[in-house]
Amino acid sequence: MKKRHILHLYNRIGFGITPKELSRLSRKSRKNIVKELFQNSKNVSEISVDTSFLNSIDPKDLRDEKFRRKVNKKVEKKLLTFQIYGLNIS
């Protein structure tokens, strides 16, 4: 399967892919790549991020620019957790 098609497939299903994995998969057929994806999806582990700090925020407080920046920094740090796992979230 062509690398650009593999990249498209992985982007559509929400996964990232390393260059090494892309190279390995490019030697396989489309059928085998999809089969492997389904087999691998049986082994999942939950990723959780503590966002309880958001519960105490009153939306009215977000009008304050300084406070909003502080909250945004915390949220950005939490999103980095997902990027470490290779998940693309926006």
Image (spheres, rainbow, N blue to C red):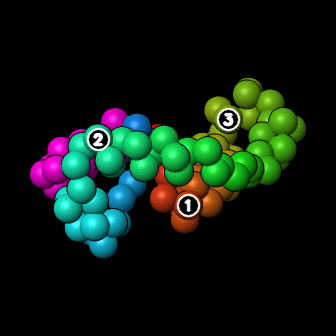
Q: Which mark is residue 85?
A: 1
Which of discs 2 and 1 lies nearer the camera? The answer is 2
* Residue range of the region highlighted in magenta in the rendering: 1-12
Three-letter amino acid code of the residue under disc 2: Lys
Name the N-terminal-most of marks 2 and 3. Answer: 2
Q: Picture coordinates of residue 11 (x, y %)?
A: 33, 43
Q: CA distance from mark 2 to mark 3?
A: 50 Å
Q: What kind of element bears circle 2?
A: helix
Residue 83 left/right relative to 16: right
Q: Residue at x 24, y 56 (%)?
A: 28
Is there CB contact under 8 Å for labels 2 and 1?
Answer: no
Binning the other alpha carbons within 10 Å of mark 1 as few (below 14), some (14 to 19) or many (20 upward) gives few
Q: What kind of element bears circle 3?
A: helix
Q: Residue at x 13, y 51 (%)?
A: 2
Binning the other alpha carbons within 10 Å of mark 2 as few (below 14), some (14 to 19) or many (20 upward) gives few
Give the prevailing secondary structure in the magenta stretch.
helix
Where residue 65 sits, quadrant-wise, is: top right
Furthest-top residue in this view = 60
The residue singled out by tag 2 in the image is 31
Q: CA distance from mark 2 to mark 1?
A: 26 Å
Name the N-terminal-most of marks 1 and 3. Answer: 3
Name the N-terminal-most of marks 2 and 1. Answer: 2
Q: Residue at x 62, y 60 (%)?
A: 81
Q: Nearer the viewer, residue 19 or 58?
A: 19
Is there CB contact under 8 Å for labels 2 and 3?
Answer: no
Which of discs 2 and 3 lies nearer the camera? The answer is 2
Q: Which mark is residue 62?
A: 3
Where residue 76 sits, quadrant-wise, is: bottom right
Q: Was residue 3 drawn as part of the magenta stretch in this picture? A: yes
